[in-house]
């Protein structure tokens, strides 16, 4: 497995230049799954070249989809008339988004079998919300050993109340409803911008979805969507936020381009609350050297609140603020464990319970060897390594490669010194 050797700059702010943001991981994966709702070809443009996208392509190919890379970031997917109904067990187990394939396969073929989806280890990540909703739409659910099988001759429209606003459950059921018979109303939906983009993509090919981006989504079911459709993946707001935090800690002056600040209001406000100097336009952020960071409290929430995916990175920033900050992770119960490693680097952290922590700053961090526990905490360790004195080694680079394309090359282009060490070096 690869790891990253990260040079620490002892708190000096040295990054400078322009950092463009890639296409959104958490939209790209759903657009790949959505291709199963189409007859014929679908062209996906501006895809991020990350491991999760490769795995999703692998699963689609295994189901019978032909995929051709027509340009560096564009993939053409050719959907056969009949697709297989078993998800590849090993790949599905390693990717949370594998659950998103379940809806379109069930709706299209009347059957699907799959293992419990895996992905980043950040909490229990159950799928009860999905299963309850599929049952409401008429599916029979069986669990045999570790394999779920869902069957329904034809999914029926239904009224579904999600007991919590889950992003992937909202997307999966919205997609399933596109091919169901009759009208589906989804209540207590998640409102992430990626859900709205997904509905726009499907509607552009003939789906009838209303209300995506709000808590109530209404879908009129129908037949397969028209092929030869094109979908351009929008910028990744979590990557843009990650870069903004890196800039706040390590940059003299950094421009982050290809992003949509209008989708990042909670993050921009949180950065401004700690004293980060930000200018922004319609599609860029400009972050200037911001010494004298102030403490602040963050509480993660569903969109439009502060995203759980930036909690670990923001906590690294808080280790450098003067005073006491409070971090409240409300979405996942396993997303504060990385703090013990920050503590070993010299951070003054009190983990109160699985959801809450106190960070006292500023503290000098010392480079050390760490293992990336998940995608976002992995990047948080790289940033902590850049702020620290001395070198750090962040093992399990594959966790970071899942969601950030060529992270070392892109950060090195603006002045970082990160070296990928492959297993056999
Ligand atoms: N939940 C249940 N039962 C369910 C589904 C969800 O209890 O059946 C709970 C979860 O355990 C969690 C809460 O609901 O406590 C919200 O989780 P959600 O389902 O919204 O998360 P997700 O859809 O699995 C997506 C992103 C995550 C991101 C979360 C929250 C994808 C592929 N993943 O996950 O992204 O953290 O929404 O915004 O879209 C990441 O990119 O690093 C990442 C983990």
Image (spheres, rainbow, N blue to C red):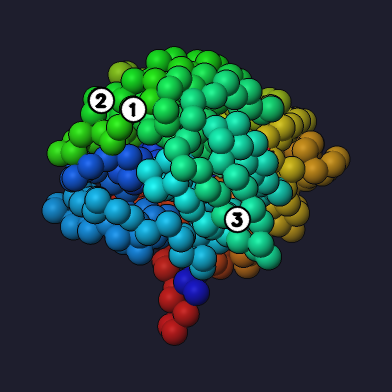
Which residue is drawn at the image coordinates 43% and 22% (left, top)? 182
Most foreground residue, 81 or 38: 81
Q: Distance between the residues labelled 1 and 3?
A: 26 Å
**Which label is found at residue 148?**
3
Going from N to C along the chain, the mark reached first, 1 or 2, is 2
Quadrant in which ligand 1 is drawn: top right
Residue 14 found in image quarter: top left
Residue 166 found in image quarter: top right
**Which label is found at residue 222?**
1
Instruction: State left or right for residue 61 relative to residue 383.
Output: left
Residue 149 position in % (x across, y down): 57, 54
Q: Residue furthest front?
A: 153
Instruction: State left or right for residue 19 relative to residue 420.
Output: left
Local secondary structure at mark 3 = strand
In the image, is residue 381 above or below residue 88?
above
Residue 55 position in % (x across, y down): 40, 60
Instruction: State left or right for residue 47 relative to residue 411.
Output: left
Q: How crowded is mark 3: few (under 14 residues within 10 Å), some or many (20 or more)?
A: some
Local secondary structure at mark 2 = loop
Residue that carries the numbered disc 2 in the rendered image: 206
Most foreground residue, 168 or 254: 168
Which of discs 1 and 2 lies nearer the camera? The answer is 1
Q: In which quarter of the image is the C terminus?
A: bottom left
Which residue is drawn at the image coordinates 25% and 51% (left, top)? 81
Q: Is mark 3 within 8 Å of ligand 1?
A: no
Q: How many marks?
A: 3
């Amino acid at each position: 497995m690869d790891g990253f050797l990260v040079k620490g700059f002892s708190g000096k702010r040295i990054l400078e230049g322009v950092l463009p943001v890639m296409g959104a991981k958490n939209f790209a994966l759903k657009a790949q799954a959505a291709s199963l709702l189409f007859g014929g070809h679908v062209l996906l443009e501006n895809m991020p070249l990350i491991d999760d996208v490769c795995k999703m392509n692998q699963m689609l190919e295994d189901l019978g989809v032909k995929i051709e890379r027509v340009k560096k970031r564009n993939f053409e997917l050719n959907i056969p008339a009949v697709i297989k109904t078993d998800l590849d067990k090993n790949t599905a187990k390693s990717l949370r988004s594998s659950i998103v394939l379940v809806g379109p396969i069930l709706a299209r073929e009347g059957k699907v079998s799959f293992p419990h989806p895996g992905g980043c280890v950040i909490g229990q990540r159950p799928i009860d919300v999905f299963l309850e909703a599929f049952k409401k739409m008429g599916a029979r659910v069986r669990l045999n050993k570790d394999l779920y099988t869902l069957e329904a001759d034809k999914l029926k429209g239904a009224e579904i109340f999600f007991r919590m606003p889950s992003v992937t459950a909202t997307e999966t059921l919205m997609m399933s409803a596109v091919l169901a018979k009759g009208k589906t109303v989804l209540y207590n939906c998640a409102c992430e911008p990626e859900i709205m983009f997904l509905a726009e993509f499907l509607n552009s090919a003939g789906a009838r979805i209303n209300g995506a981006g709000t808590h109530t989504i209404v879908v009129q079911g129908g037949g397969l969507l028209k092929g030869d459709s094109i979908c351009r993946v929008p910028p990744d707001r979590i990557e843009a936020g990650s870069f903004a935090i890196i800039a706040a800690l390590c940059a003299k002056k950094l421009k982050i381009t290809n992003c949509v600040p209008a989708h990042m209001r909670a993050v921009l406000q949180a950065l401004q609350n700690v004293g980060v100097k930000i200018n922004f336009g319609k599609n860029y952020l400009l972050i200037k050297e911001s010494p004298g960071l102030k403490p602040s409290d963050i509480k993660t929430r569903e969109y439009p609140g502060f995203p759980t995916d930036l909690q670990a990175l923001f906590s690294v920033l808080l280790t450098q603020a003067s005073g006491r900050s409070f971090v409240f992770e409300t979405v996942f119960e396993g997303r504060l464990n990385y703090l013990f490693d920050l503590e070993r680097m010299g951070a003054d952290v009190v983990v109160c319970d699985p959801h809450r922590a106190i960070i006292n700053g500023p503290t000098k961090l010392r480079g050390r060897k760490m293992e990336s526990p998940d995608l976002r905490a992995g990047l948080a360790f790289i940033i902590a390594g850049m702020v620290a004195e001395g070198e750090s080694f962040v093992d399990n680079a594959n966790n970071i490669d899942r969601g950030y394309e060529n992270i070392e090359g892109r950060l090195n282009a603006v002045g970082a010194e990160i070296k990928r060490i492959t297993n056999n070096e």
